[in-house]
Amino acid sequence: MGGGRGARAGAPLALLALLAAGLPAAGSAGEYDYVSFQSDVGAYQSGRFYAKPPQCVDIPADLRLCHNVGYQRMVLPNLLEHESMAEVKQQASSWVPLLNKNCHMGTQVFLCSLFAPVCLDRPIYPCRWLCEAVRDSCEPVMQFFGFYWPEMLRCDKFPEGDVCIAMTPPNATAASKPQGTTVCPPCDNELKSEAIIEHLCASEFALRMKIKEVKKENGDKKIVPKKKKALKLGPIKKKELKTLVLFLKNGADCPCHQLDNLGHQFLIMGRKVRSQYLLTAIHKWDKRNKEFRSFMRKMKSHECPTFQSVFK
């Protein structure tokens, strides 16, 4: 669930307590704020031994989650114990669609402090309150896609003390939440070919379909297809296609403008959660649109990364 529009918003941040703590910054990290407390950050390290010593490397342009985060170099292994850049890219790719949802302005800072930590002489983890602020704003959006905040990012793992990564003062986090949008998150998609490709890769299945009807059921929107063609089957068995129905999770009362006119064909992407097939993105199938035509061309040759999803 690319871009990080909201994560890039806000005034540039500076190195504060980092210098007072005597930690030399390797590379540019001018858009982070380091907040100093007193406890031992070393308690948050895993104690894992690696085959290679930590190394400082360039953040590649195809690490979409973090390539524009505000500094150019990162440490491997990272703070999630990914030892290779390939593993970082694979795991980080599953977060790009969420970044596009603009659920909290600190989402990119929080995630990249773990996936692509800035080069320093010791690991600096995100502040616990930043994790909690991002989690509390983004998990309700994630639930539309059948996801919950993953165990690997449990906020009580992160420090309340010593030096930690922040973005805004703790009492200012409420102002960073998006205002006013009530559109169902799976329907609020940027029509850019790269964003559609990223969502396709993060989805388990993709269908081209016409829709017979949409009705409310147990707080969800139930979508009954009329005609469908599988672009990516994933967990859907061929024998299930004939009777397939989809659900827009928690979507009974939020608008999905694409479903206002069922006369069109749609590109629908989704994933299976328990016994339900959930809609996680919908676009009008529009060959006249330049970006959609570009997506159709890229789809034929694009190879998605393979990864074990961090979302359980």
Image (spheres, rainbow, N blue to C red):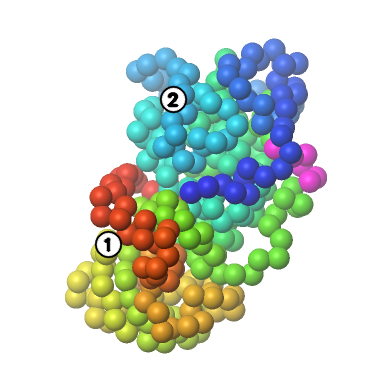
Q: Residues within 10 Å of mark 2 (few under 14, many from 20)?
A: many
The answer to whether residue 186 is visible is yes
Asked if residue 274 can be seen in this view, the reply is: no
Tell which residue pokes out farthest to the left in this image: 239
Residue 173 percent location from the top left of the image: 74, 47
Q: Amino acid at mark 2?
A: Pro
Amino acid marked by disc 1? Lys
Task: Say which of marks 2 and 1 sits in front.
Answer: 1
Q: Residues within 10 Å of mark 1 (few under 14, many from 20)?
A: some
Q: Quadrant of residue 159?
A: top right
Q: Farthest right residue?
A: 171
Residue 128 lies within the magenta run: no
- Give the side of residue 63 with respect to residue 225, left or right: right
Q: Which residues are magenta?
A: 167-172
Residue 279: image location, x then y, percent: 42, 69
Q: Which mark is residue 77?
A: 2
